[in-house]
Amino acid sequence: MSRKPEGPLRRGWTTGACATAATAAAYQALLTGEFPDPVEIALPKGERPAFALARQELGEDSATAGIVKDAGDDPDVTHGALVLSTVRRGAEGSGISFRAGIGIGTVTKPGLPIAVGEPAINPAPRRMIAEAVLRVAAAFGGSADLEVTLSIPDGEEMARHTWNPRLGILGGLSILGTTGIVHPYSCAAWIASIHRGIDVCRANGVTHAAACTGSVSEDGVKRLYDLPDIAFLDMGDFAGGTLKYLKAHPLPRLTIGGGFAKLAKLAAGSLDLHSGRSELDRKAVAEWLAALKAPPGLVAAAASANTGNEILAEARKAGIPLADEVARRARAVAAGIVEGKVAIEVVVFDREGALVGRAGFD
């Protein structure tokens, strides 16, 4: 995750909100011959934002409107994406149907809130779009029988930087959003992706998953186990969000992989491992070293060391199994969160990806 900027942060709009506004504008144009610009929509919590149109195309039996997504100050991979909606009249009684256009993914694995074979348009955006269609129909004399095709021209490339390929969403991005609003650096989208990853594991019979703090530790776990791609959960700093969801939606086995400093935070009881929201408890690490009968000089140095990796390097030089102790304590914290519903092991890697500590499955 990129560094949070200083000062007040500007909110943005989800892909779901943009798709809703584009659909409303396109359907109004199909019924009246004129595009509303800007187009106003109602969000689930009552806000009524207006969106400027970036594209307008009116054909004989279809209309297309496009909106450039503004994610505000959130480091969203889809910021600046062009969200397009093309609408066509459907057969009488057909209701609203959704199609995946260019850059919108298709669900290929069970476990997600959308059925296999459907375009990756989540339930909340579907409801928002349906409600917008009904409002336009009521205002301009249309029906609720409509085919809606959503597209994001660069969506397939953008999706490579998301969880979609791992979740079995192929061909592009998902249309997401619950409230329509992006709250910068709220981390909600990341945690929701972790939850969906767990759901996909459960639905596809995965019995052993890996939750890793980053790519180095993920690569390290891959050297230890031959697990399918969907078994790897991009936990990042959100140990609490991962473990609490697993308590309610358990898997048989979980390997937690991470660097020494982050897992030392977990070992000390921190469930948010981000450097801006928790600090390495050097005093605790010094106490662990003392319990391992480390030399007094090493214990004292640990209490005032600049970094966790500095402490780890000195402990390894002295032959003290500090990383194993961190793994053992981190496993105990994690096991306490899941309350025995998931068997857990913890593996610790150095910056080069070498395995330096491990507390295996009991």
Image (cartoon, rainbow, N blue to C red):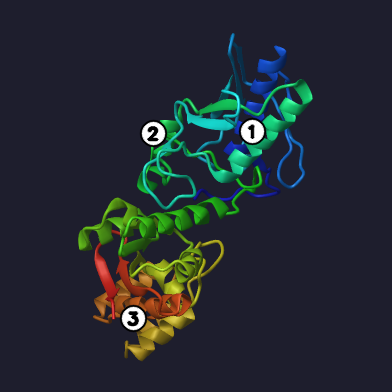
What numbered label is drawn on residue 171?
Answer: 2
Q: For the residues marked 3 and 2, what is the alpha-carbon distance in whole angstroms?
A: 44 Å
Q: Which residue is nearer to you in this view: 229 or 293?
A: 229
Left or right: 231 in relation to 102: left
Dot 2: element: loop
Does the image show residue 339? yes
Q: Earlier in the sequence, mark 2 or mark 1?
A: 1
Q: Residue at x 70, y 22 (%)?
A: 142
Please indicate whether residue 248 sits to the left or right of residue 201 in the image: right
Q: How many labels does the image show?
A: 3
Quote the CA–CA distance across marks 2 and 1: 21 Å
- Within 10 Å of the Cα at label 2, are there few (<14), some (14-19), or many (20+) other Cα atoms? many
* Percent of width and height locating residue 200: 39, 54
Label 3 to label 1, Cα distance in Å? 52 Å
**Disc 3 or disc 2, which is closer to the eye?**
2
Classify residue 67 by image quadrant.
Answer: top right
| Disc on the earlier residue, 3 or 2 | 2
- Depth check, mark 3 against mark 1: the one in front is 1
**Nearer-the-camera pick, 207 or 264:** 207
SS at mark 1 in the image: helix
Residue 20: assigned label: 1
Vertical order, 114 against 95 (above or below): below
Which residue is disc 3 drawn over? Answer: 325
Q: Which amino acid does label 1 sit on?
A: Thr
Up/down of 350 relative to 188, above or below: below
Residue type at numbered disc 3: Glu
The answer to whether 30 appears left or right of 173 in the picture is right
Q: Which of 279 and 336 is in front in this view?
A: 336
Q: Which residue is drawn at 68% across and 36% down?
A: 131
